[in-house]
Every structure is written in C-alpha cells, then in structure tokens.
Amino acid sequence: MALDYLSLLNPSQGAAVMQTEGPCMIIAGAGSGKTRVLTYRIANLLEKGVDSFNILALTFTNKAAREMRARIEKVVGPEVKNLWMGTFHSIFARILRSEADKMGYPRSFTIYDTQDSKTLVGQILKELELDDKLYKPGMVLGRISAAKNKLISVQQYLNDPAIRADDEAALRPKIGVIYQQYQQRCFKAGAMDFDDLLYQTNVLFKDHPDVLNKYQNIFKYVMVDEYQDTNYSQYLITRKLSAKDRNICVVGDDAQSIYAFRGADIQNILNFEKDYPELQVFKLEQNYRSTKNIVRAANSVIKNNQAQLRKDVFSDNEEGTLIEVLKAASDNEEGKLVAQSIYEDKMNQHLSYDDFAILYRTNAQSRAMEESLRKLNIKYKIVGGLSFYQRKEIKDLVAYLRLTVNPNDEQALRRVINYPKRGIGDTTIAKLVEAAEQSNHSLWEVVSNADQFLPARVSNPVVGFGEKIKEYTAKAAIHDAYEAAKQIAKESGMIEELYADKSIEGLSRYENIQELLNGIKAFVEDPEREEKSLGAFLQDIALVTDADTKDAQAEGEQVTLMTIHSAKGLEFRNVYIVGMEENLFPSQMMITSRADLEEERRLFYVAITRAEKKLTLSYATSRYQWGNLRSCEKSRFLDEIDPQFVDFKFAATPAGPGAGESPFGHVFERRSNLVPPAPRKTVATKYVTPSDFKPSDTSSLQTGQRVEHPKFGFGTVAKLEKQDGTTKATIKFEEVGEKTLLLSFAKLRVH
Ligand code: ATP
Ligand code: MG
C-alpha cells in the first residue's frame, strides 16, 4: 500500500523524501523531522522498487537504528530485515569480518574494548621502560585514537615531524613507537579496537579497489543521520562508498554537534558542499516535537554561540507551560524534588513513567536521582550506562568496604585481592582457593596465613594484602563510615590508579568514586541516623545494590535516566535537566576555551530540545565535595534562557567556590584557564521573590503605572504596544533596567 506522504510530511520534508537520486543534505534544527525524513525516504525507496539489500542507513546509536527499523517495518513489513541499518561501528565490523582474510585478520577477530586497549598499552609502556609519570595509558591511547580518526598511519606518525611536534613539546617523543607496537600487537592477537573498525575500513577500501567497488555496487543509496557528529574517518568512508552512484543523503544540525572531544568535525558539513557541487540542500524550520515555549527557549540559548549557523526554528504546537526551575539545598534534596515532581505530574496528569526522562551532564549525578526514585518506588532505567552501584569502580570500592566489615566475604575478597595490581597472579589465587577447600578454612583465613601455604616469594604480597585489610578493619572500628571509606579508597591504591587515567572514561570513574564518598558523607551527616559506622552504611545500600540487578529485567513503565550525550535524537514528554550549576554544567573539566564553552552550550541545546511538553531544570545550592559541604553557583546557562519562557521559582544564590583540592592531594585547577563567561544578560539574582507573590490582572494596564515582577522587581510601565492580538509592555525596572515583556507571559503585580 502506497503511503500518503503529503499527509505525513510538510512540503519541504516531502521534497526531501521524494528527492531520492543524487546527493542531498538536510541541515535543520532539533525536532524538525530530519530522522522522520530519513525513515520515509527509505520507505519511499522500497516502494519505488529499490532492493532493500541496496540501502545503507547509518545511525548514531543502536537504539536509533532499532527505532527507525520499527517505524519502517510498519510500512514495508519484513523486507526491513534486509536493510543495512546500524551504527558505523556495527556495520563496518560486519564488513570487515567478511573481508578479514584480505587484510590478514581472522574472520572471528576480537574487538578490544577500551579496557583491553588500555591494558595492552600499559604492557607496552612497561616493556619500553618509559617514565610512567609522563606516559599514562589513557593519555597515550587518546593520542593513538586521535591519530587513527584522522587516518594517520603508524608510518606517517613515525616519519612526519609535524605530527610528532606536540608529543616532542610535551616531552613524550615515544608515542609513535608505542603506536607502532600497539598496532603490531593487536594484529598478532587478531584484534581490532573501536577506532580500528573505522580506520581499517578505510585501509581496506584504499588497498583493495575491487572490494570498494563491490560495496559501491551494493550500497546504491547511502544515508547518514546525525551527520554533524561524524569524524574524518567516517566522512571518508561514506564519501568513498557513494562515489559511484552519488546517492548520498545526510541529515544533521550544527547546533547539536557535541562530540568534538571525540574527533567529530563540523568541517564535514562544509566539505560535503564542496564534494558535491550538484548538492540539493533542504531546509526544515518547523519543530514538531516541542511546545512554543520550549522551542523559543532553546533558540534564545543557542543564540549565544558565535560559531553557529543561524536558523529560525519555530513551532506551531501549543504555547505550553513555562520552563520550571527547581532550586534545592543539596544534591539529595534535588533528587527528592525531581522524584516528587515526577510522581505528582504522573498522578495529576495521568501520565506513564515512560513519559519522563532525567538528563545529566556526568554519570556520577545519577546516584542522588536513583536513590530518590527508589524511595518513592518509581521504576527507572539507565540508558547507555550502568546503574550507579553496578559500575566497576563502585563495585571495587564497595568490595573493599565489605571486606573491611567482613573479611570472610569471599566474593569481595576475590574481586580486589589483586586490584589495584599487587603481584598476586591467577595461579596464586587458584592455589589459595584450593588450600581453603582442602583445609576447610575460609579463603580469608588462608590469605591471612598465606606464608603457611605458599613459598615466601609468592606469599609476601598476599600476606601484605591481609595486613592491609586488618588495618582497615581496625580503622573502621574507630571512625565513622566516611572517614573509614575515604582512607580505604586512598590506601588501597584505588584513588591513585583512577587519578592516573586521564581519559574521559577515567575522569568519569574518578567522579563516580568521589560521588560514592559524597553519598557516604551525606549518610553520616544525616541527623536522623543513629548508627554511622561503615557496617550501617553497607546495610543501607545493600538494598539498592541488590535491587539493581532485579531492575535490569524489570518490565513496565520506567523513568529514563541518561547523560545528555546519549539522549541525542530522542524525545520525551517531560524532561528534567538536573545539576544546572557552574562547574557541573558547563563542566569545569571540559571548558578551557570559548570553543569548549560553545560545545557545552550546544549540549544544553540538545538537552532542552528533547522535551515535548514540559521542561524542568534543577540545581542545588550545595553539594558535598571531598567531604566538605560546598556552596554551588547556579549555571550561567540558566541566565541565558530568555526569562519570559521561564518560571523562576528561586531567589538569590551565594557565589560558589572555585576549584577544590581533594583530600587525596589532587588539585583540580582548570578554571584558571577559563575564558571569562559571556556577559550575563540579566542580573536576576538580586531581587528576592516574596513568597506571597500573586500576579494581578493586567488587561487594563496603563503607562506610568508601577508594577512588580517576580524576578526583576519593581518598575514603571513606559510603553504598551498591541500587536497580533498580544500586548508588549516596555517596563523600566529599578534594578535591571528596561525590559520588554509580553503581557500574556509576564507575571506582574500592579501597585
Ligand atoms: P533531532 O534533531 O532531535 O534529531 P529530528 O529533526 O530528527 O530531531 P524527528 O525526531 O524526526 O526530528 O521529529 C521530531 C518529532 O516530530 C517526531 O516525533 C516526529 O514524528 C514528529 N514530526 C516530524 N515531522 C512531522 C510532520 N510533518 N507531521 C507530524 N509529526 C512530525
Ligand atoms: Mg533526529
């Protein structure tokens, strides 16, 4: 049955769907139907008789691919199974497998994850006897990854002084050699890392024109969603694949480019125009996802970016409710307010928990949210990551804490006996386990008497480990849970190990540990708790950690929690963006230049534009950081939203602290490099909203009248203009100067 595209699409969308031949590009704002166009374009191609095996559609996440597949299936049925649809990594891993023998790899090559790659780099560093202060695995891997994404081969790296200039300047001249060894070792092990999946695809197409030709004939139509976030390597692959038929269609939004830190390059959009002079460009300006308020608020934020293509995105949907801002005294209270708000909205508006999403900047923020949702028995799922207590580093530290309280806890013992590495190998552990079984003792008893079971050379580190645990147990007996946990985190060597890893993932793990300690601090400071021991804390979280495993399979309605990065392309009825604080969002760790700040702002734009009906932003005025309660300043991004779209429920906030020093002696001093923030548009924080503020009827407002605004304070009406059925009032405020407000939005009290 043919689809009625006219009723499903607006004229520009329809034109893009019908334009099946030749290169085409749609660069348009959020929620304007770009993904919808790709979906119907594929349906249209199939209806026109194009074989489903000849269509390649590249999405950014597997979830996006699944959703698109489901939508197309409704139109074309089981044919959908033959489409080549998925992420760059999944599609090209498939192709590399079938062509592996041409490159000397086994068909069943292993895909190394980041941890595997890091371990390998670590081994190479050791073998080369490089200074481990200068060469850290995460950092080295980052350099190798960046090289591969720019298609710089080992030979180029070794031979081109310009490529090595940065390394030489940083006194790390050996990166090229490590890169060489790393590639050789991966090859010998029959393994590719994530970057290889793209890099080797490029090598394959370059060295084997016959293979390229074969895939050019298969992929007669190529489509790419979220094109703004492709890197150079991905750009080249798609260009090569579509060089013959030139049927390539890319869609994206430069305002949503949020992966520059992973090598994504906005130049790819500009290159695209150069590569295909016959390019057809389509503009989509209508947002179908969100209310007018949300769309306008998003526009007012992105306007602050200098390096942004100007777009006029509008919505024909209802005006909608104002964006709500929640102010909390602490991160735990923020969680509570958000959970309560979700519960109330669900009940009052008869919604499903599936309608709600909580978005955050960093993974560590999920802890407070998860705990509050659990207290209200609200089911949730974490997309693109693990629940807080399921994360490796949290499990590791919790295992130390469990072992401290109960050294007989065998699972905990096995987990950390050689983490961080202390020279206790698998064979030794196997021997200890065997000795425990034979002598009918617990593993712990064998460990603490290891010298009786093993020769001194092997038993020394085991005995040392046993002594450490005993020390921790003694500490836990005299200190509260926080003090004990902090010392254990440090003395176990975990903190040093995590701090040494300067990759994005490493930073996230370090933040998670910090967040766990914050949670423990809040636990011991809670006046309602009588027992503040480590044992009491573990008892308290036992339910959380246990319930998590069950939740993984839980069915039914669930609130979605995820980082903003993983929310790209998705939409939810009600969205909460939490942690709207300076240093958290924009992230202190990420901004060292204006370009970084603009990327953070695009991230905020992505977050806002996920919401269909209601958007809530929240922040806390204090958080625990390294065991101290620190005050937080609300995010500059809150002030960038045009106030007429916001319901500010807050008053003045105290200025926050700068960078902090951790109790582990690690200084996080990045703000010194910061570009000063763009001038603030409003000075809204001076005026404290009276709690009894009730807006008056302003239908008969006159110039010269004195009015009060919940955010701007007192002022006098200078001008009233009627336009298109609405009235604009220009008001001279005593504290913030002149403002023009739409009367239907502005809450004013007439005096
Ligand atoms: P993003 O930039 O966030 O990826 P997008 O441009 O890909 O957004 P879509 O997700 O395709 O936008 O569309 C946003 C929402 O609007 C979807 O729910 C989609 O079904 C709906 N939509 C888009 N175009 C139309 C239309 N012409 N009629 C009705 N609904 C539409
Ligand atoms: Mg999309």
Image: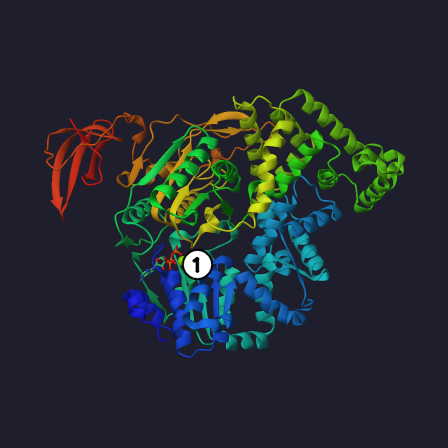
Circle 1 residues within 10 Å: few <14, some 14–19, many ≥20: many
- Ligand 2 within 8 Å of the CB at mark 1: yes
* Quadrant, the C terminus: top left
Residue 702 % position (x, y): 10, 33
Residue 644 % position (x, y): 26, 40
On screen, residue 82 versus residue 112, left or right, reads left
Confirm whether residue 61 shows in the render: no
Residue 392 % position (x, y): 63, 43
On screen, residue 407 versus residue 572, left or right, reads right
Identify which amino acid the numbered label 1 is placed on: Glu
Residue occupying the point 59% across, 67% down:
94
Q: Does 265 sit above or below residue 51?
A: above
For ligand 2, give the image quadrant: bottom left
| Along the line of sight, the residue nearer the viewer: 22 or 555 | 555
Q: Quadrant of residue 701?
A: top left
On screen, residue 10 versus residue 53, left or right, reads left
* Quadrant, the N terminus: bottom left
Residue occupying the point 83% across, 41% down:
432
**Secondary structure of residue under mark 1:** loop
Residue occupying the point 44% across, 34% down:
336
Residue named by callout 1: 226
